[in-house]
Amino acid sequence: MRRKIVRTGSSLAVTLPAEVVEAFGLKKGQEVDVAVHPATGAVVIRPGVRLLEDGKVTARFRALADSVLDRYDEAFEKLAR
């Protein structure tokens, strides 16, 4: 799908079609991650990953943190000496 770049204040923006907004459950004001793929140069827009909910880390973040701790436990212990 092709979209035009539009000016919004002093910035440039690309609008998202309604079907994309609905498919990802996006809301006005929600943060998204924008990156450039290193090999293809494609601009990638992803819904932001929420790390906190109601002041506590999310289950997803906890699982990611635990997997990092499990994987690098020995290295962390060596670094702590």
Image: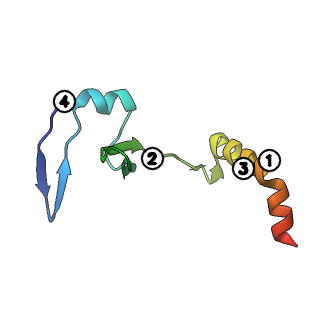
Q: Viewer-proximal residue, 39 or 35?
A: 39
Give the amino acid at mark 3.
Answer: Val
Few, some or many C-alpha atoms within 10 Å of disc 1 (few <14, some 14-19, many ≥20)? few
Q: Viewer-proximal residue, 42 or 2?
A: 42
Quadrant position of the N terminus in the picture? top left
Q: CA distance from mark 3 to mark 4?
A: 38 Å
Few, some or many C-alpha atoms within 10 Å of disc 3 (few <14, some 14-19, many ≥20)? few
Decide which of tag 4 and tag 1 comes sooner along the chain. 4
Give the amino acid at mark 1.
Answer: Asp
User: For mark 1, what is the residue?
Assistant: 70
Residues at discs 1 and 3 in contact (Cβ within 8 Å): yes
User: For mark 3, what is the residue?
Assistant: 68
Few, some or many C-alpha atoms within 10 Å of disc 2 (few <14, some 14-19, many ≥20)? few
Decide which of tag 3 and tag 4 comes sooner along the chain. 4
Q: Is residue 25 above or below residue 5?
A: above
User: For mark 4, what is the residue?
Assistant: 1
Q: Quadrant of residue 7?
A: bottom left
Q: Residue at x 67, y 40 (%)?
A: 59
Q: Nearer the viewer, mark 2 or mark 3?
A: 3
Q: CA distance from mark 4 to mark 2?
A: 22 Å
